Image (tube, rainbow, N blue to C red):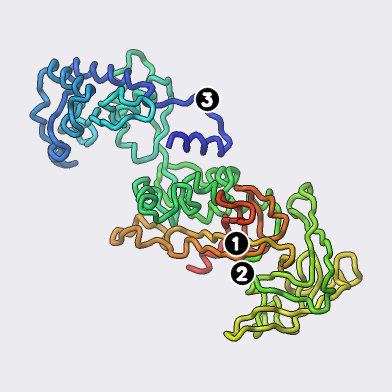
Amino acid sequence: YVDSILEDIKWLGYQWGNVYYASDYFQQLWDFALKLIREGKAYVDEQSAEEIARQKGTPTVPGTHSPFRDRPIEESLELFEKMNSGEIPEGKMVLRAKIDMAASNMHFRDPIIYRVIHIPHHRTGTTWKAYPMYDFAHGQSDYFEGVTHSLCTLEFEVHRPLYDWFIDQLADSDYRPRQTEFNRLNLTYTVMSKRKLLQLVQEKLVSGWDDPRMPTLTGMRRRGFTPGGIHNFIDRIGYTKYDGMNDISLLEHAVREDLNKRVMRVSGVIDPVKLVLTNYPENQTEEMEAINNPEDESMGTRKVMFTRELWIERDDFMEDAPKKYFRLTPGNEVRLKNAYIVKCTGCRKDEQGNVTEVYAEYDPQTKSGMPEASRRVKGTIHWVSVPHSLNAEVRLYDRLFMVEDPSAEKEKDFRELMNPESLIVKSGCKVEAYLKEAKPLDSFQFQRIGYFNVDKESAEGNLVFNRTVALKDSWKKQNG
C-alpha cells in the first residue's frame, strides 16, 4: 500500500516534501501512553472486545465502567509493558483512555488506544507488539510533525473532539494542529468502501487493485485515465461539507476532454469484416496522408497504407438498410477516411447467412488533390489495410455496477448488482501498422470508436488495448 500511494502521487504530478510514517513516532506515542497511565488517564482492560462493546451503552444510554477502570496505576504500567513484550496473546488486553463513559459523543467512552498484534510490522519488524489505534496516533503524529491543518473526510467529524482531547493532554505549548473535514469523493456506478473493494479483489471478481474498472488511481492509470483529466474533474466538483454523489460521466468527460487535445488518431477495427474494392488494382499499394490530431497541428501527419482489401467495422455495412443509414449498403456511397469515395455493390455470405465480404467500387477521382475530391457524401467510415494490419485484443470496459448507488441498495448484496458487461473482451481485432511500436500506457483515439490505451499485458505480437472512454457518453442513452 505504501509504495502504491507514493507511485500514485508521483503519477498525478506531485512531489512530496517529506514522507512520514506513524511508525516514526512509535516510541513517542508509547511514552505519551505511559504519561496518560501515570496521570490516571489510561488503564489496561482485560475484558473481551464483546464485553467492552456492550459496556459502551448507546447514544441515549450511558455506558458502564469497566471493572478494571480503577486498577492501580503501577499495575497498568506493568501490564502495558507485558503487552509489548510478547507475553500477552492478541485480544487479551487493551489500553483504554479514561475519559467519560456517560459522554454524548460515543468516542469519549474510554476509547481503546493500544492493542496487541503479533504480526511483524513492515517497517519496524518485531520491535513492537503493542500498537496504537488510529484515533490515538492521528493527532499526536500531526503534533510531532508540526502539522497546522489536518484534513479528513466527513466521517471523522465526530472524532475531532477526541483528536483535540488527546492533543490537550500532550501539548506543552499554545501550538495546536486543527482537524478540518471535507466531503468524500463518491462516484456513481461504483463502490468506494475499502472493505468492499478488498472483497472484490479477494474474491477475484476483479483482476486486482489495478483492474481498470476499479476506482483506484492505479486502476484508472491502467485504464488510460490521465492526471490532467482527474485534476480537471476535481476542480469542477470542488469540496463541500455535504457527502453527495458525483456522476462518473463527469469524470469520463474530463478525461475525454484531456485526451482529445493530446492523443493521436489511429484506425482500429473492433469487429472486422473484409471490404474488397473490385475495381482497384490487385497488387497496388498507396500511401495516404492522415492527420495525427486535428486539435493540435504540431503533431503533424503520418502515412497509412491503402490496398484493394480493407478491414471495416461489421456494423458499417447493412444489406437492407433503413432510409437514414449513411454507411455501406448496396447502391450507397461513403468516403473511406483519408482516401477515396466508394460505392457498395453487394456482399458475400456463408451458409449461415453471415456476411463474410463486402464489395465496392472506388472512384479514383475522389482522392485528395483530385478533381472530385471535394464531392460530398453523407457517410465517412474508417478502415485498415488487410496486408498491413496487426491483430489485437481489445478490452471494452464499462461501469462496474448496474445501479447508480450500489451502497443504497440495502436489500441486496452489493455483488449482485455488478454489471455482467463491465468487461467484454474482443479478440481478432485489426489495428493499423503504426501501433506496432506502441508501449504500455500509450493512449490513442480509435477513430469513431473511443479512446484506448495499451495495457501492461500487451507485448509484441500480442497487442492488448483497453477502452478508456467512448467518444460520447452512450450509457445514459442505453439506460435512460
Residue 153 sits in quarter: top left
x 22%, y 19%: residue:
36
Please report contact status of discs 2 and 3: CB closer than 8 Å, yes or no: no
Query: In the rendering, which numbered label is found on residue 396?
Result: none
Could you tell which of marks 1 and 3 lies nearer the N-terminus? 3
Q: Left or right of 103: which side holds 121? A: right
Could you tell which of marks 2 and 1 lies nearer the N-terminus? 2
x 44%, y 34%: residue:
2
Residue under circle 3?
17
Give above or below for 279 relative to 33: below
Residue under circle 1?
472
Residue under circle 2?
271
Q: Is residue 254 visible?
A: no
Residue 380 image offset from top left, x and y in percent: 73, 70
**Nearest the camera: 310 or 141?**
310
Q: How far separated are the C-alphas under marks 2 and 1?
A: 19 Å
The mark closer to the camera, 2 or 3, is: 2
Could you tell which of marks 2 and 3 lies nearer the N-terminus? 3
Around disc 1, counting alpha carbons within 10 Å, would you say few (fewer than 14), some (14 to 19), or many (20 or more)? few
Tally of marks: 3
